[in-house]
Image (cartoon, rainbow, N blue to C red):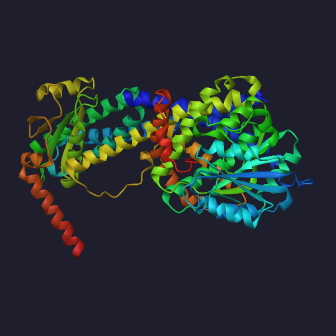
């Protein structure tokens, strides 16, 4: 016997399960955005603090400026933002907002770090790589370049990589593109103020990186291994 | 973009699949008391029963099959066994003759030219005058009390025209057989739940028992695209004849041991389902055919296509993730990284929640199947095998079955399925 009530009841239960799944997923997704925002706010405070210290440089000696306060969380923030983008999509308004915020924080960190080196000449001169990518499907090598840069950061923990979405509509990114003459052919890398277009392997990049970075890394490794053997 | 469209199309499938699962689970729980009552019915009058054993080159298993039938706890004068040798080239006929000689009052043997399973069963039907008639494949084995349990259903409800058993895979050894062990365990629940909806999908070859009048009224078995058991079920639904399931009537069947054998068996079943469903399209969406015509048959038909899509989508997702790992490996080499536990990186998409619920329901289905059956299985040991291997087979046999059906290709591959080559 065909009992329509049974089918309506089943539909209600199934719809309720789907609705619960939808709301749970939305809840966690929003929580994720809040987490990223909170990290970004912390980084913004770090940078603002460093900028303030920097403004005071005229009055205080360089020894009082702490370069370690320069946004150590930027790297993990990038990973978390990437996860959020994967889940919500690159066109999601929250994701676009977070990416713009993240890009600005990276630019500020970059400028501040450079200025600090110029004024105070910090002991370990940081090495920067500025990386322009696209995830619109028009850059076949961008994913591979991402793997290379992630690995490079593992090998050289002192390396600072700043990643920018070429297609993000943000005046500051446009200025960066203009300064380093970045056209639409991607991936594009800026190392020591020189622009390189196209995919670069680990070996290629190692030849382009200054020796100070490699020496710093090998010294750190030796120190670590010495410590372990004790 | 393409990924978004593919993913978007998955949601209606997931909704329908979950709807189907919820429907079966609610029907089951709604009738739980009735199911308990079924188990207690004692037979007052034993009807006569004839069991046909169609065989083609079954020298290895025929003896054990006949032994299991002879060991049935049922009055000997009420049970007859009809062995039909469908042109075997091995010692099948000789073995059957020995048994007929030893049990002349119970076993009859017929030999004929090879003509297919349906012809062998029909010959047995013509030579049977029993009240009930059933069939047992020569590679299947019955439990001692199975027939008694089945017969009790006919006595409990005079409208019952056929009773299906509870089938398990016999001694699953290979990975493919262990995969089938899970599939059959799922079938234990499905048959029971479908039975509560009067919507049993198939009266399987191993030991489904019918009232003889079913065949008197509807005629014998047909070739039916090499799935005669599905066709007779459709014919019964069309004639409004009631089919129920006996979850305590244990029957064991030998599942294909190799991937090739499994593939060709499923290909035959899938194509048979499609072809026969199309032959009986008049049953679709007709209220007079109840839950079977309105919901379960159309949904099962739709799932053949959506199942293929879902399997392809899963394989596509798996491969795209795999290609990312391979690309990373080729670009920077393999470097082990200690996984970092951070709740932030947990997959919290809607699809992951829906799939988790469906997986839980699937485990519940297996648990109920195991509870219903008298043969308790350690299904958790075989579940990972099923989970990994089954999605690989589904797109292969469903894709091929759909392609062959709509291009009307000849079933030359049916010869590859040794379980059907009668």
Query: In the displayed structure, does residue A46 sit left or right of residue B304?
Result: left
Residue at 49% from the left image edge and 35% from the top image edge: B401
Q: Is residue B211 above or below residue B238?
A: below
Where's residue A111, x and y in %? 17, 36
The one nearer the camera, B213 or B358, is B213
Where's residue B96, x and y in %? 67, 61
The one nearer the camera, B411 or B307, is B411
The one nearer the camera, B380 or B145, is B145
- Give the residue furthest to the bottom: A230
- Give the residue furthest to the right: B44
For the image, the number of numbered tags is 0
Query: In the displayed structure, does residue A223 sit left or right of residue B304?
Result: left
> Which image quarter: residue A221?
bottom left
The one nearer the camera, B262 or B309, is B262
Residue at 88% from the left image edge and 46% from the top image edge: B156
Q: Is residue A199 above or below residue B278?
A: below
Residue at 37% from the left image edge and 28% from the top image edge: B2
Where's residue B141, x and y in %? 67, 59
Query: In the displayed structure, does residue B157 sit left or right of residue A224?
Result: right
Any part of residue A9 in sight: no
Query: In the displayed structure, does residue A201 sit left or right of residue B26?
Result: left
Q: Is residue B73 above or below residue B313?
A: below
The quarter of the rendered structure image containing the N terminus of chain B is top left
Any part of residue A165 in sight: yes
Where's residue B185, x and y in %? 63, 52
């Amino acid at each position: 016997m065909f009992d329509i009530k049974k089918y309506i009841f089943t539909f209600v239960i199934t719809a309720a399960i789907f609705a619960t799944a939808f709301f749970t997923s939305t809840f966690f997704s929003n929580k994720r955005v809040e987490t990223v925002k909170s990290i970004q706010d912390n980084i913004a405070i770090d940078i603002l603090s460093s900028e303030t210290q920097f403004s005071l440089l005229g009055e205080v000696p360089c020894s009082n400026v702490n370069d370690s306060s320069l946004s150590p969380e930027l790297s993990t923030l990038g990973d978390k933002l990437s996860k959020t983008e994967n889940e919500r999509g690159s066109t999601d308004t929250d994701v676009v907002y977070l990416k713009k915020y993240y890009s600005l924080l990276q630019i500020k960190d970059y400028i501040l770090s450079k200025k600090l080196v110029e004024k105070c000449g910090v002991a370990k001169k940081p090495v920067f790589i500025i990386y322009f990518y696209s995830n619109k499907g028009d850059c076949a090598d961008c994913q591979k370049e991402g793997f290379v840069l992630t690995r490079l950061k593992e090998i050289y923990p002192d390396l600072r990589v700043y990643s920018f979405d070429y297609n993000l509509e943000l005046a500051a990114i446009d200025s960066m593109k203009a300064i380093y003459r970045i056209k639409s052919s991607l991936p594009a890398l800026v190392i020591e103020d020189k622009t390189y277009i196209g995919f670069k392997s680990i070996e290629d990049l190692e030849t382009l990186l200054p020796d100070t970075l490699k020496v710093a890394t090998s010294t750190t490794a030796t120190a670590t291994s010495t410590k372990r053997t004790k | 973009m393409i990924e978004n469209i593919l993913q978007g199309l998955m949601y209606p499938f997931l909704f329908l699949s979950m709807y189907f699962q919820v429907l079966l689970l609610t029907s089951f729980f709604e009738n739980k008391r009735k199911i308990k009552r079924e188990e207690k019915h004692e037979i007052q009058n034993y009807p006569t029963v004839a069991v046909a054993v169609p065989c083609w080159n079954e020298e290895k298993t025929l003896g054990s099959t006949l032994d299991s039938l002879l060991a049935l706890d049922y009055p000997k004068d009420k049970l007859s066994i009809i062995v039909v040798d469908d042109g075997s080239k091995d010692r099948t006929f000789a073995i059957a003759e020995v048994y007929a000689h030893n049990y002349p009052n119970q076993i009859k043997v017929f030999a004929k030219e090879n003509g297919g399973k349906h012809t062998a069963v029909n010959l047995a039907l013509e030579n049977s005058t029993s009240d009930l008639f059933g069939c047992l494949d020569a590679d299947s084995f019955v439990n001692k009390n199975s027939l008694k349990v089945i017969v009790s259903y006919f006595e409990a409800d005079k409208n019952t025209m056929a009773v299906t058993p509870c089938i398990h895979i016999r001694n699953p050894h290979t990975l493919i057989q262990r995969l089938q062990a899970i599939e059959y365990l799922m079938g234990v629940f499905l048959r029971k739940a479908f039975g509560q909806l009067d919507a049993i999908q198939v009266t399987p070859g191993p030991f489904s028992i019918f009232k003889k009048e079913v065949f008197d009224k509807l005629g014998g078995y047909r070739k039916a695209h090499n799935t005669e058991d599905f066709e007779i079920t459709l014919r019964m639904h069309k004639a409004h004849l009631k089919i129920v399931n006996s979850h305590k009537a244990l029957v064991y069947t030998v599942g294909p041991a190799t991937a090739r054998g499994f593939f060709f068996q499923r290909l035959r079943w899938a194509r048979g389902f499609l072809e026969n469903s199309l032959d009986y399209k008049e049953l679709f969406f007709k209220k007079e055919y109840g839950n079977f015509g309105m919901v379960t048959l159309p949904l099962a038909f739709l799932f053949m296509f959506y199942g293929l899509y879902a399997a392809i989508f899963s394989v596509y997702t798996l491969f795209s993730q795999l290609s990312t790992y391979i690309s990373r490996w080729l670009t920077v080499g393999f470097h082990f990284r200690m996984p970092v536990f951070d709740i932030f990186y947990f997959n919290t998409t809607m699809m992951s929640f829906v799939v988790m619920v469906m997986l839980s329901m699937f485990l519940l289905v297996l648990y109920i199947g195991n509870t219903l059956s008298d043969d308790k299985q350690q299904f958790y040991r075989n579940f990972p095998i099923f989970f990994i291997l089954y999605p690989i087979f589904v797109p292969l046999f469903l894709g091929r079955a759909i392609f062959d059906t709509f291009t009307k290709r000849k079933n030359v591959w049916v010869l590859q399925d040794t379980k059907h080559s009668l």
